[in-house]
Amino acid sequence: MKIHEIKGICPIVAAPFTPSGVLDEDSLRRLLYILASERKENAGCMAAGEVCAASKTAGAAGGSLSDCTAAEPDRTAADSDGVYGEKLCGALTLFGIAGEYYKLSDAEQTRFARIAAEEAPRLNVPLIMSVTKHSTYTAVEEAKKLEALGADCLMLLPPFFLKPSGEQIYRHMLAVCRAVKLPVMIQYAPEQTGVTIPPEILCRLSEESENARYYKIECKPSGGYISSLLSRQPSARVFAGNAGYQMIEAFDRGAVGVMPGCSMFDVYRRLYDALTNGDRSEAMRIHARLLEILNHIRQNVEMIIYFEKRILKRRGFIDSDFCREPAFVSDRYFDRLFDEYYERVSELFML
């Protein structure tokens, strides 16, 4: 797919499993199509019920979701500049931390990527695939493989096991960028990795490799880092991470998109629209409602994965909310408070 720019809502696609823990390919296809929904003038966007019912029918018949025309979105998402505006999502991201990449085998990751690539012509949304291998050799091989499978952009999680030096991290990132022709997004997530990367290193990378042009910034606090990076590299395209906790600040400082979990992607799109349309009060209202539930369900990574899947199942996007162990274990109080917050945020759903 020819793309000129990625921006907006680029959610991390969850890895759906059956109750027995097997990768659920039917749910994955259905989820991809829902995330590729188009805004509709009369109802905000595609009706989720139509998508889910159609996809389940296709799955029961032994076909893929692409066999079902009712589930298939419009194919006119890109404008003449290749910028995606009518789609609710600017891109779909595979193998992010919230996508449980670390619980998938290599064979499962390849199958996951193949399914997304098979559906890509009908999804008509760019695919970002993350490279997470620790060694430079295997990361380069993985990057080449994902490019061949059909990724439109790569996201690169720099190595962190045993705390490599800044120069080692830089050489790793440069080698991956030079191994492919795709644009590359660098994921900076020091809370999860324990490794810090000064913005000067990312700017140096952009100078040495023209395809290093996107950055997902997830440090805490992230605002100063974003400003520092953009002051040194004004052409960098920055995405907010951390479930969009600081999405308003990030956009104020120059971010062009956000990469949250996928369960409430349409609420993030409402927030994005308010921000880009200059409706500050509406943006504040939507963000406050999001923060209510995020503050409860995102007390650690496994916890938000658990509740993300609860939301996805409740909305009919996937069949099972099974999480592979080790996983978060809820209790009655967590569930009861989750139900309260869910009812409040569901008022903002577009599907």
Image (tube, rainbow, N blue to C red):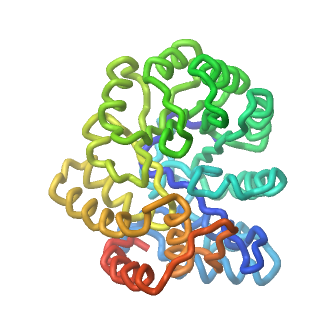
Front residue (pair 316, 15): 15
Q: Is residue 221 left or right of residue 134?
A: left
- The quarter of the displayed image where residue 306 is located: bottom right
Quarter holding residue 348: bottom left
Q: Is residue 91 above or below residue 284?
A: above
Quarter in which the C terminus is drawn: bottom left
Residue 9 in picture, x, y percent from top left: 44, 51
| Percent x, y of residue 60 | 77, 83
Q: Can you give x and y, in whole percent of width and height, for residue 181 in the image?
A: 68, 26
Residue 164 x/y as whole percent: 63, 26
For the point 52% across and 53% down, which residue is it? 76
Q: Residue at x 73, y 37 (%)?
A: 147
In the image, is residue 137 above or below residue 87?
A: above
Q: Residue at the spot x=42%, y=35% of the render?
A: 238
Kindly indicate the quadrant of the structure image that contains residue 29. Answer: bottom right
Q: Quadrant of the N terminus?
A: top right
Looking at the picture, does residue 301 appear above or below residue 250?
below
